[in-house]
Image: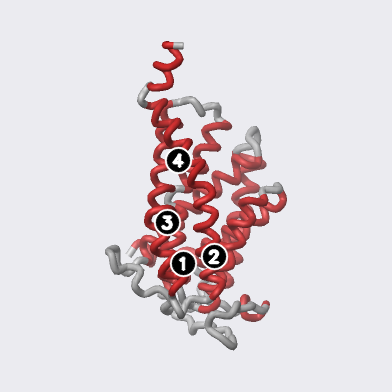
Amino acid sequence: NLSNNFRETFVSRDTPKRVSPILIQTQHPQSLSMFSIHELRSAPYSQDIQKWFLMWSISFLFLRNILFRSKTADFSNRFVSIVHALIAIYLSYESFESIDSKMFDKVGTKNTSAQTYCMAVSLSYFIYDCLYCIVTFEFDAVVHHIFTIGGLTSGVVNQKSGVELVGCLFLMEVSNPSLHLRSLLREMRMKDSMFSTLNDLLFAVLFLVCRLVLGPPLVYKTLTCKNSDLLVKLGAFGILAVSLLWGWKIVKMFISKAKRLLGMETRKKKRA
């Protein structure tokens, strides 16, 4: 199995394949779980979270100072983001127990090892990228990342809600390669190319379908699930809210790019 081989390559030898769940006692299942340093360190795959965090950081430094020295820091960071998106899409897809209308019926249940590992890898990335966004004053992204980090941390430490968290992660990341590629093409002065236009359209379609069509039903199931922690619910609602704010801008961009692809803007200019 490719997924098992992939995990075995990056999982440390001293990390057990089956880990006893770490449960944080709360007075009410819907109360906000607070994590101590000890609980975070003893969480499943905690060592791998640290290793992946170092890998994202070192990769950025290598790209920024060696491979893409003539480009901006944003160029290198977005390249790292594309790599994470591809890995996250693969790991989340491999962790799905089924792909049908009932795939999200187990919302709020115990994680599988594949789901926990997938969340751990992405948690390390979002911590890295959140720190980068703080340094570069990209506070809109920081807000998005805080919601994501909260949900993923709850899933990894409490060892439950893997179904909805990994499902949400997949829906978020599917459109991200195209999103970050837009900025790379802009810096490479390919913004007006046909490839860039097609990439913009692909991004818009994936974003709108995954986040605003498939996403809301999953968020609804998460919010109404009695077993899901408050952090998970806040994360789901926060990401949906941010997606709705971005959605209208993306719809306008899609219409503009579609008109350009069909030659409608060119015709108007000629008539003028």
Asked whether the residues under the numbered discs 2 and 4 touch, taking CB atoms below 8 Å apart as contact, a structural biologist would say: no
- Residue labelled with disc 3: 171
Rate crowding at label 1 as few (under 14), some (14 to 19) or many (20 or more) other CA atoms within 10 Å. many
- Residue labelled with disc 1: 165
- Residue labelled with disc 4: 251
Asked whether the residues under the numbered discs 2 and 1 touch, taking CB atoms below 8 Å apart as contact, a structural biologist would say: yes
State the separation of the CA atoms marked 4 and 1.
26 Å
Residue 50 placement, left or right of 174: right
Residue 199 placement, left or right of 134: left
| Colouring chosen for the image of the structure | secondary structure
State the separation of the CA atoms marked 4 and 3.
18 Å
Quadrant for the N terminus, please: bottom left
- Residue at image position (39%, 22%) is 264
- Residue at image position (58%, 80%) is 31
Q: Nearer the viewer, residue 220 or 104?
A: 220
State the separation of the CA atoms marked 2 and 1.
9 Å
Amino acid type of the residue tagged 3 in the rendering: Leu
Q: Nearer the viewer, residue 1 or 21?
A: 21
Amino acid type of the residue tagged 1 in the rendering: Leu
- Which is closer to the viewer, label 4 or label 1? 4
- Residue labelled with disc 2: 235
Amino acid type of the residue tagged 4 in the rendering: Val
State the separation of the CA atoms marked 1 and 3.
10 Å
Mark 3 secondary-structure assignment: helix
Mark 1 secondary-structure assignment: helix
- Mark toward the start of the polypeptide (3 vs 2): 3
- Mark toward the start of the polypeptide (4 vs 1): 1
Could you say where residue 77 lies in the image, as x and y percent from the top left? 60, 46
Q: Nearer the viewer, residue 58 or 162?
A: 162
- Residue at image position (59%, 50%) is 59
- Which is closer to the viewer, label 4 or label 3? 4
